[in-house]
Image (spheres, grey):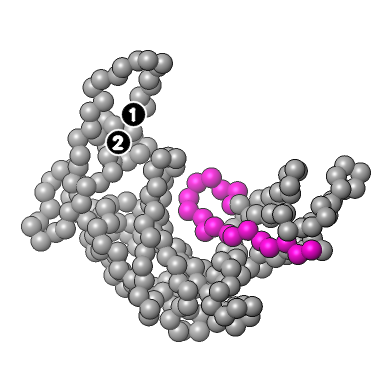
Amino acid sequence: ATAALTPTRTGNTPPPASQAIATAPVYHPGVTDLANAAVTSVGVAEERTGVDINMVTVPAARVGGRVVAPDGQPPVQLQMNMVREGVQVVFVIPTMVVRPAADGSFQISGVVPGRYAITARAASRTQIASSPVPGRGSAAQSLDLWAMETVEIDGQDITGISLALAAGLSVRGRIVFDKTTASPPERFGGVSVRLSPTATTGVSLGVSPATVAEDGTFEFAGVPPNAYRVTVTAPGRT
């Protein structure tokens, strides 16, 4: 779902005195949209001058709502992030860690204009009850619920967002080695199996590596619907 807001001001027009403001990320030559940023080439031992950037203040918004588990109860082991979409630069980490309350409610302050994805992962009570040590299950085994909501911010507060957690999928399989080209390892403890989203754009929820049993079987729990690439890595081979 998308919550869209109508722009109320542009450029450097000062917001009202009661409006919170923040410094927006700015890219050379002074734009807030990464797609419009200029590319500066620098050669070996070259000194480049005139790469000036004017900082821009923009209205900052508050974003709030609540995360609800499938049974209607507050979620357990809830983890949340707010990720700005459309930023694909290695050195830019457009992610904010959200710290929700025990009842699943959350509020994020100082959000600059842009398009964001709010993501949530949590553990179902069934999954926690099946953990070998209560409350200490691995991320792959515990966080089997997920939710994601997209919002567009342009200076106005957004409240009342509802993220309904849903059960993720289970992905199971078995690793088999072609004995004519590679012999299986003595132990599968060093073998890693990962699911990676095939999409290179947009925001995707990550999936923790699977635990491989000694017979080569593996299982991913709580996998959000998506298209994935399966990668198996063993000591000395991929």
Q: Which residues are magenta?
A: 197-214
Residue drawn at the location 58% of the way across and 59% of the way down = 207
Tell me: residue 224, above or below residue 237. below
Residue at 37% x, 20% y: name it. 42
Residue 208 quadrant:
bottom right
Q: Position of residue 130 (x, y in %)?
A: 63, 80
Q: CA distance from mark 1 to mark 2?
A: 8 Å
* Residue contact between numbered discs 1 and 2, judged by CB atoms under 8 Å: yes
Tell whether 209 sits left or right of 165. Answer: right
Residue under label 2: 27
Amino acid on which disc 2 is placed: Tyr
Which residue has dot 1 on it? 38
Tell me the element at label 1.
loop
Mark 1 belongs to which amino acid? Ala
Look at the image and tell me whether residue 47 can be seen: yes
Q: Which mark is residue 70?
A: none
Q: Residue furthest left?
A: 17
Q: Residue at x 41, y 40 (%)?
A: 91
Residue 176 point in image, percent of width and height: 83, 54
Rendering coords of residue 199 (x, y %): 56, 48
The disc, 1 or 2, on the residue closer to the chain's N-terminal end is 2
Taking the spot 12% from the left edge, 53% from the top edge, the residue there is 15
Indicate the secondary structure of the residue bearing disc 2. loop
Based on the picture, tell me whether residue 198 belongs to the magenta stretch: yes
In this view, the residue in front, 170 or 175, is 175
* Secondary structure mostly seen in the magenta stretch: loop
Report if residue 166 is visible in the image.
no
